[in-house]
Amino acid sequence: MEHVSESLAGRIAIFQLQGLSLREIFKAEFNKCFIPNEEYFSEREKSLSVCEDIWSYIHRGYMPKLNINEDIDWNIYYQSYVQTYIERDVRQITKVGDEKTFMDFMISIASRSGELLNYNAIAKDIGVSLDTVKRWTSILETSGIIYLLYPYSNNHLKRAIKTPKVYFMDTGLLCYLTRWLTKETLQFGAAAGNVFETFVISEIIKSYYNAGISKPSLYFYRDRDQKEIDLIIEHGKDLYPIEIKMTGKPEAKMAKNFSILKNLSNMNVKAGVILCQYDKKYG
């Protein structure tokens, strides 16, 4: 299968497969990629389902077996998954050497989901070289365990940083690695904000993957003054700024950094949205 993409060029569509999305778990008959405009919301509302306990889904994760059979032990399942991933999948890509150190690396990355990717800090954390961390990060990215979200680049945004952020694609795996063993400890723990942001980002990414878009135009913004926009969706010449908050009480001031984009003369900056735990479309 090594050269299958070359031999079938022009004759197949290649989809980037991940765990289940919430749409799939709730059997929603809707498969459009997330673009926060009125047309999207109007269509999406026709098949909306109320999720009474979102943190149960965030904690359990998106593995099909775990969502089909609730009797499967969550801890044992992910323990076996990680062991199989390291012993089989990773070994097919590269020689890891010390499997325990690679496990420590996965834990270190998981604890940083939703943060800027700091190779030096991870290398120091687990005691390996910078090159090793970069190589192992590439393995996680290639195998779909993590997603690197890159900063939005534009000549008018001269103070923007260039470092990507890292997100785990399965929050259940993230919780297993970082030892948030119950929904309650996760929801009310110190990492809740980052895990919620990771959940939202991964759902948006999956909406693009499931629509056949393997390289979505998704970005974030942060500058040297610590001003940040969690997500920017580029759709043609349109930009949609998005803020992700765990709150159930969104406020307009949460979107204050959207104005950073207003001077981009070559792009149409659309109305932004705040994605949060409020149960209605607001504003």
Image: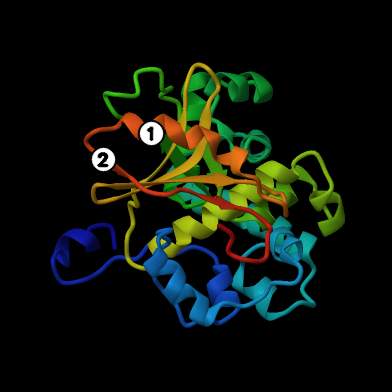
Residue 198 on image: x %, y %: 60, 48
**Relative horizontal placement of residue 95, taking residue 214 as reference (left or right):** right
Picture disc at residue 167 = none
User: Quadrant of residue 253 in the image?
Assistant: top right
In this view, 105 is above or below 47: above
Q: Which residue is mark 1?
A: 261
Residue 190 on image: x %, y %: 80, 39
In the image, 150 versus 279, the foreground residue is 279
In the image, 44 versus 10, the foreground residue is 44
Amino acid under label 1? Leu
In this view, 20 is above or below 187: below
Taking the spot 80% from the left edge, 50% from the top edge, the residue there is 186
Secondary structure category for the residue under label 1: helix
Residue 269 on image: x %, y %: 34, 43
**Relative horizontal placement of residue 102, taking residue 269 as reference (left or right):** right
In the image, 274 versus 211, the foreground residue is 274
User: Quadrant of residue 248 in the image?
Assistant: bottom right
Q: Which residue is mark 2?
A: 267
Residue at the outermost front position: 283
Taking the spot 64% from the left edge, 35% from the top edge, the residue there is 112
- Disc 1 and disc 2: Cα gap in Å? 9 Å
For mark 1, does the 10 Å Cα neighbourhood hold few (<14), some (14 to 19), or many (20 or more) residues?
many
In the image, 136 versus 240, the foreground residue is 240
- Contact (Cβ within 8 Å) of mark 1 with mark 2: yes
Taking the spot 21% from the left edge, 36% from the top edge, the residue there is 266
Please identify the quadrant where the C terminus is shown: bottom right
Return the disc, 1 or 2, that comes first in the chain's sequence. 1
Whether residue 278 is visible: yes
In this view, 241 is above or below 82: above
Secondary structure category for the residue under label 2: loop
